[in-house]
Image: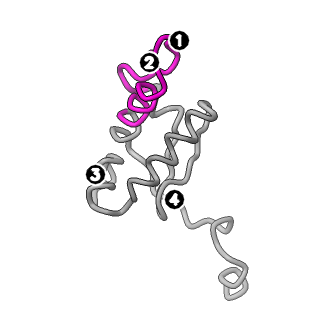
């Protein structure tokens, strides 16, 4: 899959589960400043930047008259259009067994 793949591309290719998208939406709505959110086994997404980059999601999220489903759908649209980055294989991501064999 291309480095430029959107979250939607990764979901349709079954590399990220749609349930992970739901969890990311929940994380953003609970804390809108969330940045490095793990999504799927291999990717990270800056939730705050993804929503901020969307043409209408930022306004809907802060609209006092918008209901919860509208906010969720706006965040969902923003996240699905975003481009997650591939998680690095840093020492922080490795288990103790993997580190001891190096």
What residue sits 45% from the left and 26% below the top? 71
Rate crowding at label 2 as few (under 14), some (14 to 19) or many (20 or more) other CA atoms within 10 Å: some
Quadrant housing residue 13? bottom left
Compared to residue 90, the image places residue 56 above or below, namely above
The mark that comes first in sequence, 1 or 3, is 3
The mark that comes first in sequence, 1 or 4, is 1
3D distance between C-alphas at marks 3 and 2: 24 Å
Identify the image's colour scheme: rainbow, by chain, secondary structure or one colour: one colour
Q: Looking at the picture, how far across and down is residue 12, in whole percent? A: 26, 56
What residue sits 47% from the left and 25% below the top? 52
What residue sits 45% from the left and 15% below the top? 59
Q: Which residue is mark 3?
A: 9
The answer to whether mark 3 and mark 2 are in CB contact below 8 A is no
Which one is nearer the viewer's eye here, 38 or 72? 72
Query: Magenta stretch?
Result: 53-77
What residue sits 48% from the left and 64% below the top? 41
Circle 3 sits in a helix, a strand or a loop, which is it?
helix
Q: Which residue is mark 4?
A: 87
The answer to whether mark 3 and mark 4 are in CB contact below 8 A is no
SS assignment for the magenta stretch, majority? helix
Q: Which residue is mark 2?
A: 60
Q: Looking at the picture, how far across and down is residue 4, in whole percent? A: 31, 48
The mark that comes first in sequence, 3 or 4, is 3
Name the image quarter holding the C terminus: bottom right
Name the image quarter holding the N terminus: bottom left
> Magenta span has 69?
yes
The answer to whether mark 1 and mark 2 are in CB contact below 8 A is no
Circle 2 sits in a helix, a strand or a loop, which is it?
helix
Q: Which residue is mark 1?
A: 64
Circle 4 sits in a helix, a strand or a loop, which is it?
loop
Tag nearer the camera, 3 or 4: 3
């Amino acid at each position: 899959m291309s480095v430029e793949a959107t979250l939607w591309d990764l979901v349709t290719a079954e590399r990220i589960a749609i349930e992970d998208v739901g969890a990311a939406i929940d994380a953003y709505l609970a804390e809108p400043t969330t940045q490095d959110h793990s999504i799927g086994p291999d990717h990270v997404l800056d939730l705050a930047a993804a929503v901020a980059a969307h043409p209408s999601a930022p306004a809907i999220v802060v609209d006092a008259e918008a209901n919860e489903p509208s906010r969720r759908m706006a965040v969902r649209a923003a996240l699905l259009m975003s481009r997650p980055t591939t998680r690095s294989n840093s020492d922080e991501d490795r288990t103790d067994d993997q580190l001891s064999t190096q």
